Amino acid sequence: MATNRRISRVAELIKREVSQMLLHGIKDDRVGTGMVSVTYVDVSGDLQHAKVYVSIYGTESAKSETMAGLKSATGFVRSELGSRVRLRRTPEVIFIEDDSIEQGNKVLSLLNKLEDERSPYNMTVSENTTDEDDESSEEVTH
């Protein structure tokens, strides 16, 4: 079993190397249809398996083509990792589509929508309170 520090260092190294491969190493045209970035790498405790989470920007068809290209390039990615990273055994690589960025955008748009819906209500409430405050201050001065 590797220590947590070693696992995180290996995960970061794999993330960096796979990102470089996505830019320059993988020749499959399907990988280039959507803009791909590695968001996270989860390495098992025994360093035998690596789940590579990728974020793909583009249409649904581009995403599915890109994932198919990544799955077919898994053997190439593993062999390249073996030559670039000094480990006793090269971990098996599994590509997983990460849609957390899209989910975050949906949550932000919902929050903005709620804020826009509440802002007219807040304006009428604040206008009413200022009018009442002005009237009460006039009564006190007379």
Image (cartoon, rainbow, N blue to C red):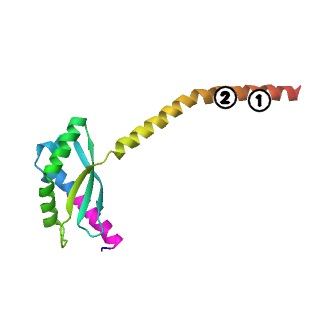
45 is higher (above) or lower (below) than 116 = below
Label 2 crowd (10 A; few <14 / some 14-19 / many >=20): few
Of 142 and 24, nearer the camera is 24
Quadrant of the rendering where the N terminus is positioned: bottom left
Label 1 crowd (10 A; few <14 / some 14-19 / many >=20): few
Of 9 and 44, nearer the camera is 44
**Prevalent SS, magenta region:** helix
Q: Which residue is drawn at 67% across and 26% down?
A: 127
Of 58 and 2, nearer the camera is 2
Q: Residue at x 18, y 51 (%)?
A: 22
Residue 94: image x %, image y %? Answer: 22, 55
Which callout, 2 or 1, points at the residue further toward the start of the chain? 2
- For this orientation, the residue located farthest to the left is 27
Secondary structure, mark 2, is helix
Q: Is residue 59 visible?
A: no
Residue bearing mark 1: 133
The range drawn in magenta is 3-17
Residue bearing mark 2: 125
